[in-house]
Image (cartoon, grey):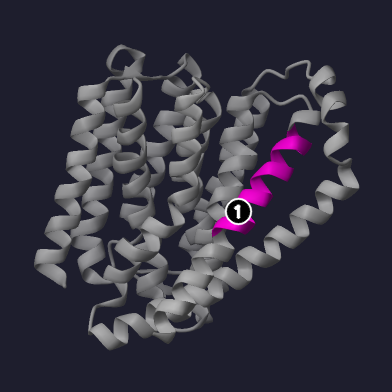
Amino acid sequence: MEAVLLGVGGLALLLVGAELLVRSGSRLATRLGLSPMVIGLTVVSVGTSLPELAIGIDAARSGSPGIATGNVVGTNLANLLLVLGLGALLRPVAFDGRTLRFDLPAMVGAALLLFVLSRDGSIGPTGGVVLLLAAVGYVVLVLRTSPREDVTAEADAGDGRGGPPVQLLVLVVSLALVVLGAEWLVDGAVQGALVLGVDEAVIGLTVVALGTSAPELVTMLVAVARRETGLAVGNLVGSSVLNIALVLGATVLAAPGATIAVPPDVVDADLVLLVVATLGAGLAMRTGSRLSRPEGGLLVLGYAAYLTWLVLTRV
C-alpha cells in the first residue's frame, strides 16, 4: 500500500508541477515573440521532459538505472505510438515543412544515437557529454532557424496573469513539485517492483513511462480538439529528442561514476523497437505531410502489441 501511495502521490505532484511549469514558461516565451511551434519544440518540450529528468537522476543516484533508462525508452514509445496515434484517431494531424525537414530527422537521429551509445550495455561520461551537446545543439538550431512572430498584443493581454517576476516564482515552485514528485514516484516504483518481483526496467517501461507521458497526451488531445496542433506536435517531437539527449545525458553525468548500466533486454529489444517505431512514425508523418486516422490506429495497435509482448515475456 505504501508503494501505491508513493507512486500515486508522486505522479500527481509531477503532473501538477509540469502543468504549472509549461503554462508559465509558455507565457514568458510568448512575450519573447516565439511561435507556438517553437514554444512547443523548446519551452513546452523541456517542461514536459522535466519529470523524466527528475526521475532519471533520482533513479540513477539511488542505484536503479533500469528505471532511468526504461522510463526514457518507454516514454518515447508511448509518445510516438500512443499519444500521436490517439491524436490522429480524433482528427488527422498535419505537419508543416519545417517539422518534416528538420525536426523529424532530429528525432530519428536521437534514437539512433542512443542505440549506438548503449550497445555495450552502459553509457559512460563521454556518451553523457555527447548527449548533452546534442540537446544544446538541437535547441540552439530550433531557435536560430525559426522565425519570430509579433505577439505584442498577446503579451499585453497576458499582463493580467502576472508579469515576469510572478511567472519566475511559478517556475521555481513548479520545479520543486516536479523534483519531489519524481522522488516519491521512483521510491514507489522500486518498492512495487520488489514486492511483485518485477524487473525495474519493466516498471520504468510501463507504469512510470505511461505516467510521465501524461502531459504530452493531455497536450495533444486538447490541441487536436481545438484544431491547434502546432504546439502539440512541436512538444511531441521536441520531447522525443530531449528525453534522449537532455534527460539521459544529464542522468549519466549525475550518476555515481558518471556511468549508467543499460539492461540487456532494453538494449536488445526495447531500443531496437524504439528505433523501428521512430522510423515508422516518421514515414507515416511524411505521407502527405499528415497522419491519417488509419495510420493513427496502426500506431495505437502497435503500442498495444508492445505492451502485450512486454507483459507476456518479461513479467
- The foreground one among 270 and 12 is 12
Residue 270, above or below 186? above
Q: Which quadrant, please, contains the C terminus? A: bottom left
- The foreground one among 301 and 74 is 301
Question: Does 309 sit left or right of 28 as displayed?
Answer: left
Q: Is residue 267 magenta?
A: no
How far across and down, in percent of the image, does residue 307 sit? Answer: 19, 56
Q: Amino acid at mark 1?
A: Ala
- The foreground one among 58 and 269 is 58
How far across and down, in percent of the image, does residue 297 sit? Answer: 21, 31
Q: Which quadrant, please, contains the N terminus? A: bottom left
Q: Quadrant of residue 282?
A: top left
**SS state under label 1:** helix
Residue that lies at the very extreme toward the top in this rendered image: 288
Residue under the point 87% across and 49% down: 166
Residue under the point 66% across and 30% down: 143
Q: Quadrant of residue 110?
A: top left
How far across and down, in percent of the image, does residue 209 sit? Answer: 38, 59
How would you classify the magenta stretch by its main secondary structure? helix
Residue 79, above or below 1? above
Residue under the point 26% across and 26% down: 283
Q: Quadrant of residue 193?
A: bottom left
Q: Is residue 23 magenta?
A: yes
How far across and down, in percent of the image, does residue 44 sit? Answer: 60, 41
Q: Which residues are magenta?
A: 15-29
Query: Is residue 150 something that shows in the picture?
Result: yes
**Residue, disc 1:** 18
- The foreground one among 128 and 266 is 266
Query: Is residue 125 something that shows in the picture?
Result: no
Residue under the point 68% across and 18% down: 147
Question: Does 55 sit left or right of 122 as displayed?
Answer: right
Residue 99, above or below 78? above
